Amino acid sequence: MQPDEIALEPPAARTIDRRRAAERVEALFHEHYGRMVGMLARLTGDRAQSEEIASDVFHKLSQRPALLVSGEDVTAWIYRVASNAGVDALRAISRRRRYEDAAATGAIRLAAESSALDAMLAAERAARVRSVLASLKARDAQLLLLRSSGLAYRELASTLGIEPGSVGTLLARAEAEFERRFRARYGESL
Amino acid sequence: MKQCWPEGALRAYLDGELPPQAMESVTAHLSECAACERLRVELAARAGHVAGLIGTLAEAVARTPRRQAAARSAGSWGWTAAAVALAAGLAIATVLVPKPGTPKPAPVAVIETAPPAAEAVPPAPALAPERAPVPARAAVARKSRRLSALPEPFLALDNEPIESGIVMRVTVPGSTPADIVFSPDGRARAIRLVNGTKQDR
């Protein structure tokens, strides 16, 4: 074995208490899983897929026990990975234009309800918003999504790896770009 | 003194995310600078517009995905329900049309039970191993004398706890009888093969 290969595994990883790491992952899961699924479901429009993505994030975390003792902000890490995966999923959906089909079938499914018209309009609006989000730069989409999920500027900064002082600027730009693209595609109407 | 604030600082001001001293400074500046006040109004309107649009995602999710999930689970339960209905139908036919010479019809035990789960089905000590259910094939293969004394464990069909239910014995002529636990909503929740029955009788 070459010295370089030995150095690849940090000493902390060898001395980790795996049981405590598993407890930490479980605690993080209980604290963040629901909120994460809600955030992803808003983004993708598919709760089952969102649950899969969120579960995958915690699985990845459990496979990286060194991360839990590295001093890195683990909460920021899981939201960064989750929102990355969520935006990727949204883009994949967008490429296949599945969200439009989903909106249509959702409208048909809900047609029997008394609020069928409201449901159809909501599905149509959501499809438009997802379409515009999917067209943005990934970081802009993540920023808008995470902000709408209630993350404070400090949390946004650590999650996205940006300076806290630049969150306001980046957020203002992302909102301007979102609004510009939305108006270009769909006009003034919602 | 007139110190105009950059767009990013005004955006953070709208969210109350500037340090307290800077918040006060911006407030004071906005009262005397029409240009910055116009920019603040514009940023606030845009932020509200975008937040409203992204908020529609939550509304749409609240309306549809649960239904999709329900439809999915209904689909997966559909086959189980159909199989159980068929088996139950055969069992009822067996009960209603007894063969001549048969001393008594197949027993149909109806037990109303209450929580906790372990008490839901009295002769079912195996409801506890829901997370590690006994493989059905192993359950069938395990034919020992002990079976005549101890009932075969139930095999949970899902991971939800069973708070109450009805046990129905299903007998198809020529094959092994089975006990099925139905929850109040009609779903089959657990099953066991009654291997020891023939030996007992």
Image (tube, rainbow, N blue to C red):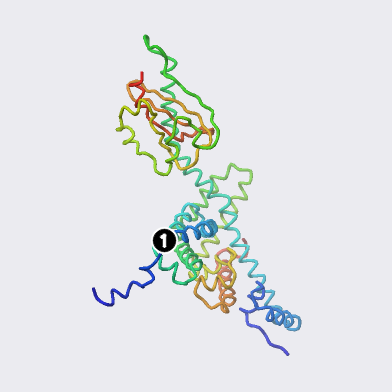
Give x and y (percent) for residue B128. Answer: 45, 39
Q: Is residue B138 left or right of residue A26?
A: left
Residue placed furthest toward the right: B31
**Above or below for A88 versus B184:** below
Q: Chain of mark 1?
A: A
Residue placed furthest toward the bottom: B1
Residue placed furthest toward the top: B101
Give x and y (percent) for residue B87. Answer: 41, 26
Front residue of this view, candidates A52 and A107: A52
**Above or below for B119 versus A123:** above
Circle 1 sits on which residue?
A: A62
Asked whether the viewer can see residue A127, the reply is: no
Classed neighbour count for the residue bearing mark 1: other residues with Cα under 10 Å, few (<14), some (14–19), many (≥20): some
Asked whether the viewer can see residue B118, the reply is: yes
Residue placed furthest toward the left: A1
Query: Which quadrant: the C terminus of chain A?
Result: bottom right
Front residue of this view, candidates A140 and A33: A33
| Count of numbered badges drawn on the protein | 1
Q: Which residue lies at the image location 38% right of the left edge and 29% below the top edge?
A: B150
Give x and y (percent) for residue B192. Answer: 39, 31
Query: Which quadrant: the N terminus of chain A?
Result: bottom left
Q: Which residue lies at the image location 62% right of the left edge and 48% below the top edge?
A: A117
Give x and y (percent) for residue B81. Answer: 45, 33
Front residue of this view, candidates B19 and A26: A26
Task: Identify the amino acid type marked 1.
Answer: Ser
Identify the element where label 1 is drawn. Answer: helix
Q: Which residue lies at the image location 60% right of the left edge and 55% below the top edge?
A: B59
**Above or below for B36 versus B86:** below
**Above or below for B62 versus A175:** above
